[in-house]
Image (cartoon, grey):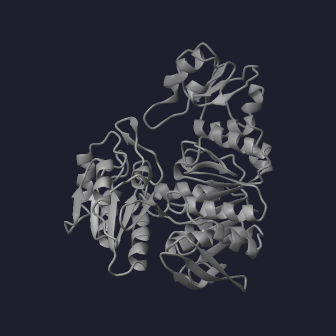
């Protein structure tokens, strides 16, 4: 593709050279001869540092920030707002694949992955070939591919969409992270519909404050064209912000018919009239546009019922029949790494979950405490990530202590931060002394597995199905599920 085509719609300071470009990337290691390298700014390293490597690998042209005084051995094109320009370049290079495929974007602090899995199952039951892009990677049919991020970088997003379109995938369900929105990765994705699940504290190591985090989430709704619908969880205290941000029709869902929101009548479009929750099953009677129907799911807890409502409201807005929605929901018996029950020779029941925010802890642990019998002992094993939002650590600890009988505090991707500092932050949220600290996560798991009874429920939080720990700057193999499954007693 000619460089002029790739740069269409992007303001540059100088005329463009007449070049035929055969590749586009921001990773200097992936540059191919005749390719274009985008020197993206980063949190810790800057793309301009890798320009020499990109040129050595055959880059025909470099696009980077302005101004740039260095001289390079290939044309250097200066642009302002490089992340936004990269988004447009990627869309141009892959010929705007999202315009020819239906893309559903889901944002929120928690629930994105579960809502995506439920919605994808519903669409597949309705005979609509569907792929999911998110925390679990790229998934369609029996294919699973890692993408590295919840929402990949712009060139990867559009390449994936282009590849999926060629495979006749008709629907893409995409988890859209606040990082991706703030970094303009999806600015040129043509979303057909957007979903908001909930909003609570997270990622304050990256965002300046909660207002910045909220504004980043709202960008997904600002990206929606006026004729595209938005789905909003009306029970969330921030729902009004998302309702106001949507330019087109808004469909709301709630655990009850009426809410306290000040906009319009306060009545929702999809609501629950009756629910039954247990550790084995969730059932609910719903009403949508005066039509009553029921759903039944193996996913437990009120917070998962909210995820079920999000997927149901989206499917109804897309015109999916209720019977397909009910069948699709019934096929999702578990979501990998989300309150997933893991078999083990240890006594009691063991669940893993990716939860890593105070709100997720409250929802998950509160659900187990509410649904378990009184004589059940709840044990929570957790840690907090290093080089990340320190303010949420004592809040997570406080929630864990509130709902647990025993706590095991351990490592969870300490990165370059000392475990002593991480644990000190955690301890600020604890009051009752019912905890032990075992820094080695494998040792901690083996210890707690050997000290459970038949009435124990163990919750292993933070990593889900990740198979590594980040210690220092290295990824070290570690797999919670493998340790639990292979435990011999």
Tell me the residue at 56%/51% (across/down): 136
Residue 220 visible here? yes
Image position of 426 (left or right of 127): left
Q: Residue at x 70, y 71 (%)?
A: 327
**How many badges with numbers are in the image?**
0
Residue 33 sits above or below residue 169 on the image: above
Residue 448 lies, in percent from the top left, at 29, 59
Asked if residue 363 lies left or right of residue 314, the reply is left
Up-down relation of residue 331 to residue 220 (above or below): below
The location of residue 282, given as percent across then percent down, is 55, 77
Which x, y percent locates residue 281? 54, 76
Quarter-of-image position of residue 297:
bottom right
Q: Is residue 247 left or right of residue 397?
A: right
Image vertical order of residue 98 relative to residue 362, above or below: above
Q: Position of residue 396 (x, y in %)?
A: 34, 62
Compare residues 213 and 370 and report the one nearer the observer: 370
Q: Quadrant of the N terminus?
A: top right
Q: Is residue 81 visible?
A: no
State the residue at coordinates (60%, 81%): 284
Q: Residue at x 69, y 68 (%)?
A: 328
């Amino acid at each position: 593709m000619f460089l002029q085509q790739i740069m269409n719609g992007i303001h540059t300071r100088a005329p463009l050279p007449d070049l035929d470009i055969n590749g586009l990337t921001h990773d200097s290691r992936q540059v191919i001869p005749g390719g274009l390298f985008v020197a993206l700014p980063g949190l810790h390293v800057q793309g301009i540092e890798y320009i020499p490597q990109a040129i050595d690998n055959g880059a025909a042209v470099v696009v980077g920030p302005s101004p740039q005084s260095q001289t390079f051995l290939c044309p250097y094109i200066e642009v302002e707002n490089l992340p936004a320009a990269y988004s447009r370049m990627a869309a141009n290079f892959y010929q705007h694949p999202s315009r020819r495929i239906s893309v559903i974007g889901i944002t929120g602090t928690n629930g994105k992955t579960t809502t995506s899995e439920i919605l994808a199952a519903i669409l597949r039951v309705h005979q609509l070939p569907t792929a999911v892009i998110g925390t679990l990677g790229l998934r369609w049919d029996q294919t699973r591919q890692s993408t590295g991020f919840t929402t990949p970088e712009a060139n990867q997003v559009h390449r994936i969409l282009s590849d999926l379109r060629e495979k006749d995938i008709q629907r893409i369900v995409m988890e859209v992270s606040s990082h991706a929105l703030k970094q303009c990765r999806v600015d040129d994705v043509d979303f057909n519909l957007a979903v908001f699940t909930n909003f609570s504290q997270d990622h304050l190591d990256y965002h300046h404050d909660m207002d910045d985090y909220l504004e980043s989430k709202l960008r997904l709704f600002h990206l929606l064209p006026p004729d595209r619908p938005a789905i909003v969880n009306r029970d969330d205290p921030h729902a009004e912000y998302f309702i106001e941000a949507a330019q087109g029709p808004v469909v709301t869902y709630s655990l009850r018919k009426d809410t306290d929101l000040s906009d319009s009548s306060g009545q929702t479009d999809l609501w629950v009239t009756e629910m039954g929750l247990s550790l084995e099953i969730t059932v609910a009677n719903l009403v949508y546009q005066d039509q009553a129907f029921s759903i039944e799911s193996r996913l437990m807890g009120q917070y998962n019922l909210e995820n079920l409502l999000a997927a149901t409201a989206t499917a109804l807005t897309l015109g999916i029949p209720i019977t397909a929605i009910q069948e699709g929901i019934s096929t999702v018996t578990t979501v990998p790494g989300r309150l997933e029950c893991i078999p083990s020779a240890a006594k009691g029941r063991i669940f893993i979950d990716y939860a890593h925010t105070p709100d997720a802890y409250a929802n998950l642990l509160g659900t187990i405490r509410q649904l378990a019998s009184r004589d059940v002992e709840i044990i929570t094993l957790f840690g907090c990530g290093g080089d990340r939002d320190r303010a949420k650590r004592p809040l997570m600890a406080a929630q864990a202590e509130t709902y647990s009988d025993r706590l095991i505090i351990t490592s969870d991707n300490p990165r370059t931060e000392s475990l002593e500092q991480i644990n000190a932050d955690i301890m600020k949220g604890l009051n009752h002394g019912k905890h032990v600290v075992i820094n080695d996560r494998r040792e901690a798991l083996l210890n707690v597995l050997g000290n459970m009874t038949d009435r124990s429920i163990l919750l292993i939080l933070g990593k889900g199905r990740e198979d590594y720990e980040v210690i220092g700057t290295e990824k070290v193999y570690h797999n919670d599920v493998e340790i639990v499954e292979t435990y011999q007693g």
